[in-house]
Image: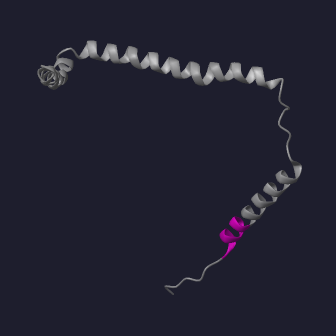
């Protein structure tokens, strides 16, 4: 007997696209409501819940301090890359077709 129920459910699944196409506005409305609900859950979990968590831990932890030595190394690296970029632009290449 359980085999008949599975065959019946497969038959119903085959008719599902036709059912949704005939009632497209209702299908759109239901899917919109479900997606809006899931979106609000994700928003709550990642924005509001994290804001509450950060407010609790902010008093316990020290604020982020910048490491001036690392910042200076990064600045020098950026300057070196910028100089290399400018040097390539100023180089004059000979015309191979002359």
Examine the image and state in which quarter residue 6 appears: top left
- Whether residue 85 is in magenta: the answer is yes
Q: Quadrant of the N terminus?
A: top left
Q: Is residue 82 left or right of residue 32?
A: right
Please state which of residues 80 and 89 is positioned toward the viewer in this rendering: 80
Q: Residue at x 45, y 15 (%)?
A: 37
The quarter of the picture where residue 53 lies is: top right
Q: Residue furthest right?
A: 68
Q: How is the image coloured?
A: one colour
Question: Looking at the image, is 72 positioned above or below residue 26?
Answer: below
Residue located 68% across and 65% down the image: 85
Number of marks: 0
Indicate whether 66 appears above or below 54: below
Q: Left or right: 46 with respect to 30?
A: right
Which span of residues is magenta-colored? Answer: 84-91
The outermost residue toward the front is 1
Confirm whether the magenta stretch covers residue 7: no
Residue name at image x 66 percent, y 24 percent = 50
Residue 12, x across and y down, in percent: 15, 20
> Is 8 positioned to the left or the right of 73 in the image?
left
Image height check: is 68 above or below 35? below
The location of residue 90, given as percent across then percent down, is 69, 71
Q: Position of residue 34 (x, y in %)?
A: 39, 16
Predominant secondary structure in magenta? helix
* Furthest-bottom residue in this view: 98
Query: In the visual, does 81 lie left or right of 48?
Result: right
Q: Quadrant of residue 10?
A: top left
Tell me where residue 98 appears, x and y as whole percent: 51, 87
Q: Nearer the viewer, residue 51 or 86?
A: 51
- Residue visible at 86% across and 47% down in the picture: 67
């Amino acid at each position: 007997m359980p085999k008949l129920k599975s065959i019946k459910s497969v038959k119903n699944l085959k008719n599902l696209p036709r059912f949704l196409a005939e009632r497209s506005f209702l299908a759109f409305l239901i899917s919109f409501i479900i997606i809006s609900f899931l979106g609000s859950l994700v928003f709550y979990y990642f924005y509001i819940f994290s804001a509450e968590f950060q407010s609790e831990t902010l008093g316990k932890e020290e604020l982020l301090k910048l490491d001036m030595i690392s910042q200076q190394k990064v600045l020098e690296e950026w300057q070196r890359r910028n100089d290399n970029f400018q040097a390539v632009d100023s180089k004059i290449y000979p015309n191979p077709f002359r």
